[in-house]
Image (cartoon, rainbow, N blue to C red):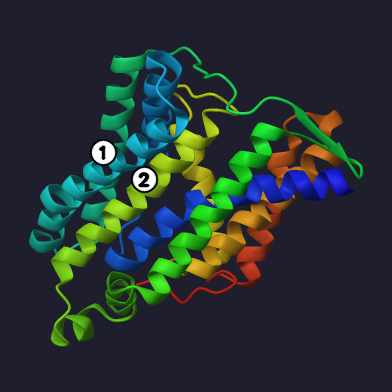
Amino acid sequence: MEQVIANGLYLGAQYALIALGLTLIFALMNVLNFAHGQMYVLGGFITYTIYGQIGLPFVVALLASGVTLAVIGALMEKFLFRTVIRRSLREESTMLLAAATAFFFDAVILLLFGEKQRGVPKIVKGVFNEGGIIMPYDRLVVGALALIFIAAFVLYMQYSRVGRAMRALAQDRVAAQLMGVKVDRYSMIGFAMGAMLAGIVGGLLVTITGVNSGIGGPISIKAFLMVMIGGAGVVGGAIAGGFILGMMESIGLTVLRQYGDVTYLAIFAALMVFLSIRPNGLMGKPWG
């Protein structure tokens, strides 16, 4: 049981960090960023290139992943989503744009890095083996870093001026604008932060699971699952959804491991029942 809980907490920390970026973008702009998984993949490949190929320190590679994805996110918001939101009267237009950017990133990643699975050297060697828990030290480090990033994000959103402005924008866009909040600026910052979080978690997990050009779609699906569980646009809900999915996956892979891929079938079935009871998630409000 201790091992199952430890694995669930480790997975939950990664998943919560992925979901935070997606739910931040949705809260600020009411945009479902279908390219979130591709941003994760791109962050993983940047870390792979800088740390695994060039040989620079892992911290430098992780920082480069976050900064690069933040710049890409800011440019996407300013030149793509902002333009579509202003000119289109239908919310479906942003969904189509997000899907198009996902396919675009898939093509770019495949062109630049190919189809092969890529991995990097372990950042820490050795295995922790105490109290019935067996966990490689690199997973402990990655899990701890994920928790630190989650805590830093929550504190930044709670106490910084930019965080307060973005929270006001998420609560009521029109009222925030009337109170002097610069909507365009903080929407761009929020999109950049959401993309940065995806890049950082991609850079973290490339050290554990590796990365390939085909995992962007599955990562996006997991991110949407977490947002749906916790409630769309709610930071606390994204964190809760990440840890719930991580624990469900850990339990499922332990209890149902002899049945192969039935774990995710059971998770999806449980999610369908849950959403039929709480369609807005644990902490969410009605969409729209």
User: For the point 54% across and 54% down, which residue is it?
Assistant: 148
User: For the point 47% across and 77% down, which residue is it?
Assistant: 285
Q: Nearer the viewer, residue 279 or 107?
A: 107
Mark 1: which amino acid?
Thr
Instruction: Give x and y (percent) for residue 261.
Output: 72, 31
User: For the point 44% across and 27% down, which residue is it?
Assistant: 57
- SS label for mark 2: loop
Q: Residues within 10 Å of mark 2 (few under 14, many from 20)?
A: many
- Judging by the rendered image, the residue that carries numbered circle 1 is 101
Q: Residues within 10 Å of mark 1 (few under 14, many from 20)?
A: some
Q: Is residue 51 left or right of residue 253?
A: left
- Total marks shown come to 2
Q: Nearer the viewer, residue 202 or 126?
A: 126
- SS label for mark 1: helix
Q: Is residue 152 left or right of residue 252?
A: left
Mark 2: which amino acid?
Phe
Instruction: Give x and y (percent) for residue 187.
Output: 22, 63
Quarter placement of the C terminus: bottom left
Instruction: Give x and y (percent) for residue 227.
Output: 51, 59
Whether residue 15 is visible: no
User: Disc 2 and disc 1: Cα gap in Å?
Assistant: 8 Å
Q: Is residue 277 left or right of residue 235?
A: right
Which quadrant of the view contains residue 244? bottom right
User: For the point 45% across and 18% down, which residue is it?
Assistant: 52
Q: Which mark is residue 34?
A: 2
Would you place residue 206 above or below residue 200 in this image? above
Which quadrant of the view contains residue 259? top right
Q: Is residue 250 left or right of residue 199?
A: right
CB-based contact (under 8 Å), mark 2 and mark 1: yes
Instruction: Give x and y (percent) for residue 204.
Output: 51, 36
Mark positioned earlier in the residue sequence (2 or 1): 2
